Image (spheres, grey):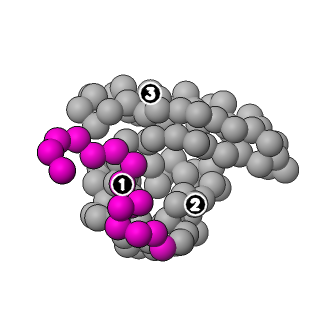
Amino acid sequence: MYVFSIYAPHSVKCDEAKQNFCNFIFQIVSEISVYEMVVFASNMNGYVGRINIGYAGVHGGFGYGIRNADGSRIQEFTDSLCLVTRNTCFTKQDSQLVSYKSGPN
């Protein structure tokens, strides 16, 4: 089993930095045997959204909000490595849908 604790570049970073990050992680993970378990305990900094259109194999349909560009990048990354965005595979209370919120409550 491989467990990765990662924090992706924030949404205000340039697309090149985000893509370089994904490429780096992809290279590492793609070298791991398909018979090994890979877990990301991470903040990938994007919304994958509630709807799993185009990503039914990796998105369970229980995400939050509307998929943004960074969420699309996450789903493409997940799909390319045959991984699953597990927190989209079960329902959660509204207070558990977002791991970080800035600004006033």
Looking at the rendered structure, the kind of residue marked 3 is Asn
Q: Position of residue 38 (x, y in %)?
A: 71, 45
Secondary structure category for the residue under label 2 = helix
Q: Is residue 40 left or right of residue 10?
A: right
Residue nearer the viewer, 34 or 103: 103
- Residue located at (67% from left, 46% from top): 39
Q: Mark 3 or 1 closer to N-term?
A: 3
Q: Position of residue 16 (x, y in %)?
A: 34, 28
- Of tags 2 and 1, which is closer to the observer? 1
Pointer 2: what residue? 86
Secondary structure category for the residue under label 1 = loop
In the picture as drawn, the residue positioned furthest to the right comes out as 35
- Is residue 27 at least partly visible in the picture? yes
Secondary structure category for the residue under label 3 = helix
Which region is colored magenta?
A: 91-105
State the quadrant of the N terminus.
top right
Pointer 3: what residue? 20
